[in-house]
Image: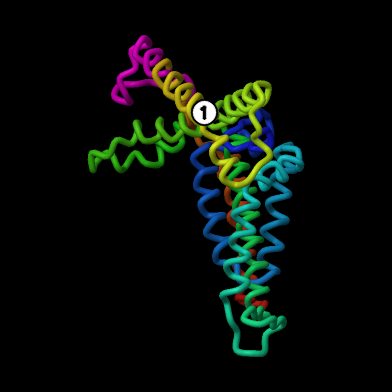
Amino acid sequence: MLKDITIGQHFPGTSPVHNLDSRLKIVLTVLFVVVLFMSTNFVSLGLAAALTLLLYKISGIPLKMLQKSIKPMLPLIFFTVALNLFFITGPGKPLISLGFIRIYKEAVLFCIVMVCRIVFLICGTSLLTYTTSPIMLTDGLESLMKPLNKLHFPVHEMAMMMTIALRFIPTLIEETDKIMNAQKSRGAMLDSGSFGEKIKALIPILIPLFISALRRAEELATAMECRCYHGGEGRTRLKQLKMTGTDITHTLVVVAAFAVILAMKMFFPRVI
């Protein structure tokens, strides 16, 4: 299960999606999220799904990565479905009526739309980290938030902190998997027993994990200090962010696709 978590992983490549300016990719990802939550019919959601699959195809990221991206979020999806399915009512007669349980058509449609939004949201945001290295992601975030420097906001420190956290997610997942295997080899019953017993079994995992995370953080801080790291002031970069005509062209194509998705609201009835 832990090996299926792909948050924070980067897959190097030379596709147009990989080569797109990191600032534009961040902006397009935010716009994609906005478009998803403004899509109120299945045609718009279908076009959003087609666009997502096309971008994965262009980037060369295997489609099986979509499954790995979604699998850890299944509990959240099931919780969202259950919460909306049983608590949303409609003006008409319920589709299912079993005692106090009543399921309406409006609830079913709302759940379908919400599941589609969550799935496409996960796939779209995962594509950003799959095709953008942590360094480029840091530089892109810092460049976009640069105007906040006038408000004395620690832009560089915030961007660095977010990227380091994202970078160490795969490392912590791997560390957790090693600790679990070590505890199982010592006879720990992590996959059996009651719910309370499973919670207690997590203690021998969490304590070494916290100690390992603190140790890694201290080693990282020491390494940065040894390399004379003092924040973003006066700091230069090996690769400067430069926006090319190709980047602008590709961005305009994606924005046009977003406009088409939103335009479907005018031609097709809304579901929710």
Residue 170 in magenta stretch: no
Q: Is residue 264 above or below residue 242?
A: below
Dot 1: element = helix
Question: Is 227 part of what is drawn in magenta?
Answer: yes
119 vs 35, nearest the viewer: 119
Image quadrant occupied by the C terminus: bottom right
**Residue at 67% in and 73% down:** 108
Name the residue type under label 1: Phe
Quarter residue 114 falls in: bottom right
In the image shown, does 106 or 251 lie closer to the viewer?
106
Q: Position of residue 7 (x, y in %)?
A: 59, 38
**What percent of the width, then of the height, locates residue 158?**
36, 35
Residue 217 location in percent, x, y?
42, 22
Which residue is depicted at the point 62% across and 66% down? 82
The residue carrying mark 1 is 168
* Residue 105 screen position, x and y as percent: 68, 80
- The part of the chain drawn in magenta is 220-239
